Amino acid sequence: MLRDKDVWINERAYAIWEEQGRPDGRSAEHWQQAANEYRLLELTKASTDGSDLIECLKAMGRLMRSADTPVELPQRFRRAKAS
């Protein structure tokens, strides 16, 4: 896994260097930018089946109920009855 990370960062840093016109003396800056991008990608990566997202939502109490579970809407969300 670490090798894949290093390869990704190196390739991204190279791409950044090329995008910026191949400037001299900025390799550390490009590598740092690529490393930051990799870190952000890792933070947002979800599992392929969504199980990590489901567990996170359960832990936060934000997982929606199944459609067959009756739910009473709070009064503020109900429409006023026409008279």
Image (cartoon, rainbow, N blue to C red):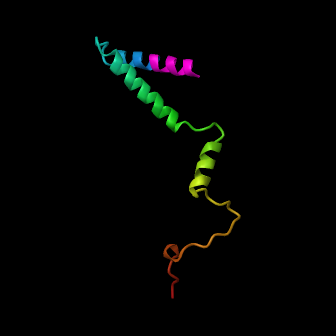
Q: Is the residue 43 above or below the residue 31 in the image?
A: below
In the rendered structure, does residue 47 fall within the stretch colored magenta? no
Magenta residues, dominant SS class: helix
- Hey, which residue is sitting farthest front in the picture? 2
Q: Where is residue 51 in the image (x, y as percent from the top left)?
A: 65, 44
Which image quarter: residue 14? top left
Magenta segment: 1-10
Asked if 61 appears above or below 5 in the picture, the reply is below
Residue at 58% from the left image edge and 58% from the top image edge: 61
Report x, y in % for residue 58.
Answer: 62, 54
Q: For the point 52% across and 75% down, which residue is it?
A: 78
Q: Is residue 69 visible?
A: yes
Q: Is residue 83 left or right of residue 31?
A: right
Q: Which residue is drawn at 54% across and 74% down?
A: 74
Measured from the top left, where is residue 31 in percent x and y?
39, 20
Q: Residue furthest right?
A: 68
Q: Is residue 21 above or below residue 73?
A: above
Is residue 25 left or right of 3 when viewed as pictured? left
**Number of callouts:** 0
Q: Which residue is nearer to you in this view: 37 or 81?
A: 37
User: How far across and down, in percent of the image, does residue 35 sit?
Assistant: 43, 25
Residue shown at the point (50%, 37%) measured from the top left: 43
Left or right: 53, with 38 as reference point: right
Does the image show residue 19?
no
